[in-house]
Amino acid sequence: MSKLSESQIKEQLKHIEDWEYSDNAIHTTIEFSDFKDCFTVMTRIAFEAENLNHHPDWSNVYNKLSISLSSHEAGGLTEKDFQLAQIIDGIIS
């Protein structure tokens, strides 16, 4: 999968909400009502990430989940990053 250009990234950002682009990755932080809800969503995301064979860089503290997506082998963002971001947005909505 090839790395997206800056113009392609800007276009893709229009299709995802609450994600920011910096340091060759897209980032979001999601707050849940409690740890159990956060962990449940993380589990659902994990299954989707495994299906795509594309795994997030993420961290969890109590009810907050921080996610960064980038394709390390491509050295930046690819279509897979935006595909996973859209799946994540669908799960949390």
Image: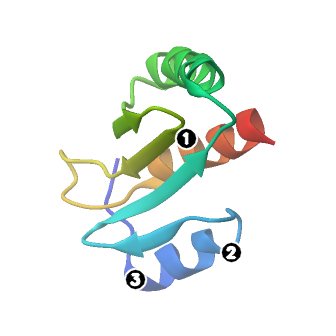
Quick one: 36 or 75, which is closer to the camera?
Answer: 36
Q: Residue at x 54, y 20 (%)?
A: 39
Q: Position of residue 12 (x, y in %)?
A: 60, 69
Q: Which mark is residue 14?
A: 2
- The residue labelled by disc 1 is 84
Q: Residues within 10 Å of mark 1 (few under 14, many from 20)?
A: some
Between disc 1 and disc 3, whose residue precedes?
3
- The residue labelled by disc 3 is 6
Tell me the mark number nearer the camera, choosing from 1 and 3: 1
- Provide the secondary structure element on which disc 3 rests: helix
Q: CA distance from mark 2 to mark 1?
A: 15 Å
Q: Marks 3 and 1: in contact by CB < 8 Å?
A: no
Q: Residues within 10 Å of mark 3 (few under 14, many from 20)?
A: few
Quarter of the picture holding the C terminus: top right
Amino acid at dot 3: Glu
Q: Residue at x 55, y 65 (%)?
A: 19
Position above or below: 17 against 11: above
Amino acid at dot 1: Leu
